[in-house]
Amino acid sequence: MATFQIKQGRDIKLKGAAPKEIVALSLPRQVAVVPADFKGLKAGLCVKVNDAVKTGTPLFEDKHCPGIKVVSPVSGRVAAINRGEKRFLEDIVVESDGRNEAVTFRKFPASEISGLSKEDVEKSLLQSGLWPVLRQRPFSKVAHPREPPKSIFVHAMNTEPLAPDVDFILQGKEEQFQAGLNALRRLTKGKVYLCVRHGAQSKALTQARGVETHYFAGPHPAGNVSTHIHYLDPIRKGDHVWYVEAQDVARIGSLFLEGVYPPERVVAVTGEGAGRRFYAKTIVGAPVSLLLKGSGLAGMRCVSGSVLAGREVGKNGYLSFYDSQLTAIPEGGKRVLLGWLSPGFDKYTFSRTFVSSFLPEKKEVSLTTDKQGSDRAIVLNHIYDSLVPLDIMVYFLLKAVIGGDIEEAEKLGILECDEEDFALCSFACPSKTDVGGIIREGLELIEREG
Amino acid sequence: MQFLEEQLKKVGQLFAKGKPFEKFYPLYEALDTFLLTPGKTAAKAPFVRDAVDMKRVMIFVVLALIPATLMGIYNTGYQIEIAKGLTHSFWGAVEAGAWKVIPIILVSYAAGGFWEVLFAVARKHEINEGFLVTGILFALTLPPSIPLWQVAVGISFGVVFGKEIFGGTGMNVFNPALTARAFVFFAYPAQISGSTVWVAVDGYTRATPLAVAAATPKGHAVVQALADAGYNFQNMFFGFIPGSLGETSALACLLGLAFLLITGVASWRVTLACVLGLLTMSSGFYLMQGPGRLAFFGLPPYWHLVMGGFAFGAVFMATDPVSAAATNAGRWIYGFLIGILVVLIRVVNPAYPEGVMLSILFMNAFAPLIDYFMVENHMKRRLQPKKLG
């Protein structure tokens, strides 16, 4: 057990945090499963429109690795299968019948989980459709059962702007969480690391057994999976590490204890644009309209996840499979006369080029989606490294990727990284460079060719 | 505001795809985003962005150059007054200086801007604000008597061969302003070196402090020789001496440096390393002084800081992030070697009285190599097993 004090990075204290109250929402009438959420899977449909499904009925199965299934989180019927360009599968919408009928799987007494074989645990997770909660690094894709991990990281803290407090969410779920950890331990010969915010209170986290608990303090991205892996068990070429969200560990526990697919998810509804901010107890794939019911959403951007690393989902969209946060912020785009000349008393910046940089830091800042500049070539190459706590020379890694030099990029440590780790770089870059996007392209190139 | 936005939109339609002025879209974009902030929103994560942009950064470098520019204007006029034996008046000096300096700056911007726009149009990318810096940097490195056509030729060379042939902003190996300066220096030595060009009065001759120091015969005290020529530490620090437009005043450069450091736009490492390198080398010479050695050896080391273009180069030229080393350790080496080379060229090289331009260009060429070793080192270290904690 150790505490890591992260120095690089910055917290963006955005306005619109969710107060700590959990509100149970009614069962959504429609939910959607978005295949693009499951990186690395090639979806082969298991259902047709109008098919009746139960909670836990497979909707699609991976074509590369049959056995990895994604299942329906509600019972009802398949209302729509939407395809985009080139028949790209956009989403599978399931209409709930409100009956909550579930496919049943094998269940185990709590005391037996630790004694299960690796195969039993794998089988349960794959059959029930909960397997995709396990993801692997490098490449942040759904874990592959035949590429065993050298260790598993439980992601039990989040430092993104307005991020949900994992510590709070897990309160009362001690039993499921521990059961989930016990199951995870069967999946690796290495260690299971539980990465927790320094100062966490919940018993689920502080009294977890059978895992190595480590504490991380400091600014974002202290809570990123890459940061944890980097400090505890860094990835080198050929390594596989798995990671899983803490809430999903509790879901794994529920699956083993109760024998049904557990669709529950607590989601923090955040951001200035959200009329009502709270922790919503709902299910995976819940529609944005349900979570933001009652908010006037004109001129708002709805993001599944945080403003730094999330995905725009639109007002009629659905929460991503892995996200436990929904953020709504005002759209930008207002044009200001001679903006580059303004003293900037109320501008938010990491740089020191506005008057506000020299005023006491505000407790909360209000930001819009405004890009606040045009795309330019990278000139200031010294600003990135202070925002990334990994041992990475960001500028040189970018150059290697842009030049298509895979070997160099690997030597510079790209396999340790994910797009989200560079969100602060993209945020702060005066040239408005999509740093994370370049890293993603590099990773995709390596995955294709490597 | 609303009106302006609508008008710009209307004009902008002429530059849209398939419209008559499509090719000149970069020009429109430059004007449009100069007047009003771009108003674009972030399409991908992160969905919020920092308020700073490249315009702001580049404008800040230009702001940092204002003290040097104003000082250049005043001092150019002041030197004319001295040369012509006129009685000194502040506004008189400013006016006389302005007539010399402002045309140089305007020509530099106009000629350089032409190429910048041409390449932006041909390459279909936006006009980079970096040119606002290059244009004035180059002007400030010139002697006040420079013919304007040479300004135009010089900046054209700098922009095209110093920057654009490498792929444009962010890709250049050499500092474009210095490339321009070097071109003029080697192409038209008569107008940019010697002792007749530093005051904008025909036929007036006055050697610069560095030339005086280099010409001091062996066995003589160099400080005395400088004093005899009218130079002391104080007037070199303030910059009331003949020289290139923006470079004479170390004080003006210090003000610029302070501004750049407070706003965090420039890397302090490079400037500090330049100063340390310069002091190290000049102290070495100072300790070796003696009979039979060059008189220049005996110059107090810190005098080098205020002489010639060192302050200007170390603050504004060496710090250009694109042509400097981009690793932190590399920045130290890069700056330190610049400082060493400056003194080496000044003191023991008989061909060039000043070494700042050449040292920085030389180290620009070596910056990628320095970075290469630093990055190799980093990659090797990454392969070592990491200790926990």
Image (tube, coloured by chain):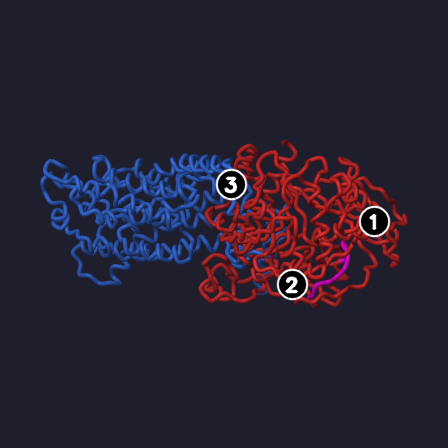
Chain colours: A red, B blue
- Is residue B13 in view? no
* Circle 1: residue type: Gly
> Magenta region: which residues?
A277-287
Give the CA separation, mark 3 to mark 1: 42 Å
Residues packed near mark 2 inside 10 Å, few (<14), some (14 to 19) or many (20 plus)? many
Placement of B98 over or under A129, stated as above or below: below
- Is residue A449 in view? yes
Q: Chain of mark 2?
A: A
User: Which mark, residue B386?
Assistant: 3
Q: Earlier in the sequence, mark 2 or mark 1?
A: 1
Which residue was labeled with disc 2?
Answer: A271
Which residue was labeled with disc 1?
Answer: A56
Which residue is drawn at the image coordinates 61% and 39% (left, top)?
Answer: A443
Q: Indicate the position of residue B61 as horizontal and vertical percent values.
A: 40, 53
Q: Indicate the position of residue A211 as horizontal and vertical percent values.
A: 64, 48
* Circle 3: residue type: Lys
Between B270 and B102, which is closer to the camera in this rendering? B270
